[in-house]
Image (tube, rainbow, N blue to C red):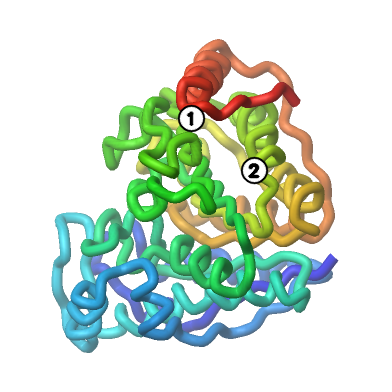
Amino acid sequence: MSTLVLTDPKFLDHDPGPGHVESPARLDAIMAELGRAPLAGVTIETPRPASDAEIEAVHSPRYRARLASLEGQYDELDPDTAVSPGSWEAARLAAGAAVGAALAVMKGDADNAFALVRPPGHHARPNRAMGFCLLNNAAIAAEAARRAGAERVLILDWDVHHGNGTQEIFEAREDILYMSVHQYPFYPGTGAAAEVGVGAGRGATVNCALPGGQADADYGVVFHDLFLPVGRTFAPDLIIVSAGFDAHARDPLAEMRVTERGFAAMGSAVRELAAGTCGGKLVLLLEGGYDLGALASSVHATLEALTGRHEDFPKGAGTAAIDAVLTTRAALRSAGRIVSPT
């Protein structure tokens, strides 16, 4: 099985400032781990920047121009989100890597792909940077895939923080299904189970809001009893994963208890979902994850799953996760989407 990894040293030029957790050291740690334990079947290539048109399919021209005007400067866009002289080029490359990964997989140049990028993207709104994010990489990739012929795109977000930007961009759409599992209530304050989309998109937003303290088995029930059946019914032409690793037990910004083997099980589950629905067309995009060792080992374990190693979730989900799944299923039923058992 061939896995394309897209990354670039220029991602290190985005520097939010001293002490910021979304630091260049994140990508350094990942690449050091891949160098220490290389994986057969992985090809590493450099991406191209996203074009203005690709960016403006998701973000307003005014917002794109505002970010471009900050090239070569230091500025603070919100209390959490800063730019440095290399940030705009890094952001364009991150979005371009997401697009390149999607198009490569759709064309059959790779079985699946993982864009190891920064800055992350899923909090970025159409007109605003937020939560360390400048451009919404997953949304830009999804729109590029639609233009390339994908009738339906599934975006699955397992970052510990809800991807409010991605949800906002697509909440009125029925051709792009957004599914998120996240700690709740937590930053950014969105992602309740009752948020199921609006208008034509009602039922195409799936939020599983978990309390803190959930472990690998708890995520297993979310995937097997919610995400996989919904994904199979939707029958996407491409699956994009906003792959954040901040639900890890050692992450400093959250309160979950997932291990690297749990992330490998998530990777196995989405790989098998893709195999059963869209010929294996699967793209992962790096989002959060702020303990360097946990991030590196979790990315490596997920790549193991993409290259063919199978990992099962452990048994023994707790009542909180089961209740969260039932709450989301009820919200989807009220929106007219029937979730069949696995």
Looking at the rendered image, the disc whose residue lies closer to the viewer, 1 or 2, is 2
Amino acid type, callout 2: Phe
Amino acid type, callout 1: Cys
Secondary structure at badge 2 equals: helix
Report x, y in % for residue 119: 38, 67
* The N terminus: image quadrant: bottom right
Q: Is residue 331 visible?
A: yes
Image side of residue 167 versus residue 270, left or right: left
Determine whether 321 is above or below 15 in the image: above
- Which residue is pictured at 66% across the width and 29% down the height? 220
- Which residue is pictured at 53% across the width and 76% down the height? 97
Report x, y in % for residue 55: 38, 75
Q: Are marks 1 and 2 in contact (CB under 8 Å)?
A: no
Image side of residue 148 versus residue 195, left or right: right
Sequence-earlier tag: 1 or 2: 1
- Which residue is pictured at 26% across the width and 71% down the height? 60
Residue that label 2 marks: 234
Crowd around label 1: few <14 · some 14–19 · many ≥20 (10 Å): many
Report x, y in % for residue 336: 52, 27
Which is more toward the observer, 119 or 109? 109
**Residue 10 occupies which quadrant of the picture?**
bottom left
Identity of the residue furthest to the top in this view: 319
Which is more toward the observer, 118 or 192? 192
Determine whether 111 is above or below 96 in the image: above
Residue that label 1 marks: 208
Report x, y in % for residue 303: 70, 59
Secondary structure at badge 1 equals: strand
* The C terminus: image quadrant: top right
